[in-house]
Image (spheres, grey):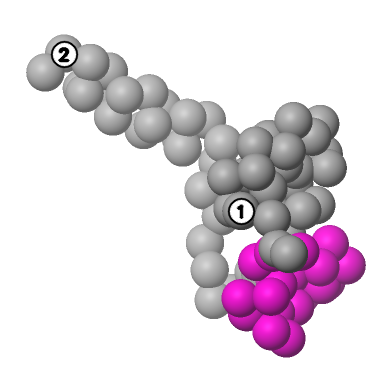
Amino acid sequence: MPMPLQVIEAEALQLPPDERGRLAGRLLETLEPGAQDTPENIAKAWDDEIERRIEAMDAGHTEAIPYEQVRAELRALIDARRTR
């Protein structure tokens, strides 16, 4: 006889965080068969994105913005929101 959902949920919530995360991942996989969100595939996707961005910079398709400028602009935005 299958266990009621409330019993399964209560027991799952007693698991340590890492085990709950693995369980959640496995359950999501059953809802999206063929999902490719494994740690290895995620790392590869980031590697591919980094490669794409480097190539765009090398080809002159994007412009680098100095950290100091970005930081100053973000600080100004944050300060403006705080004063509202």
Disc 1 residue type (three-letter) = Pro
User: CA separation, marks 1 and 2?
Assistant: 51 Å
For image coordinates 83% across by 42% down, the residue present is: 19
- Relative to 32, is 82 above or below? above
Start and end of the magenta stretch? Answer: 26-52
- Relative to 51, is 65 above or below? above
Q: Which residue is mark 2?
A: 83
- Dot 2 surroundings within 10 Å: few (below 14), some, or many (20 or more)? few
Q: In which quarter of the view is residue 1 placed?
A: bottom right
x, y percent for residue 20: 75, 43
Disc 2 residue type (three-letter) = Thr
The reply to whether callout 1 and callout 2 are in contact (CB within 8 Å) is no
Q: Is residue 51 magenta?
A: yes
- Dot 1 surroundings within 10 Å: few (below 14), some, or many (20 or more)? few
x, y percent for residue 37: 74, 70
- Circle number at residue 4: 1
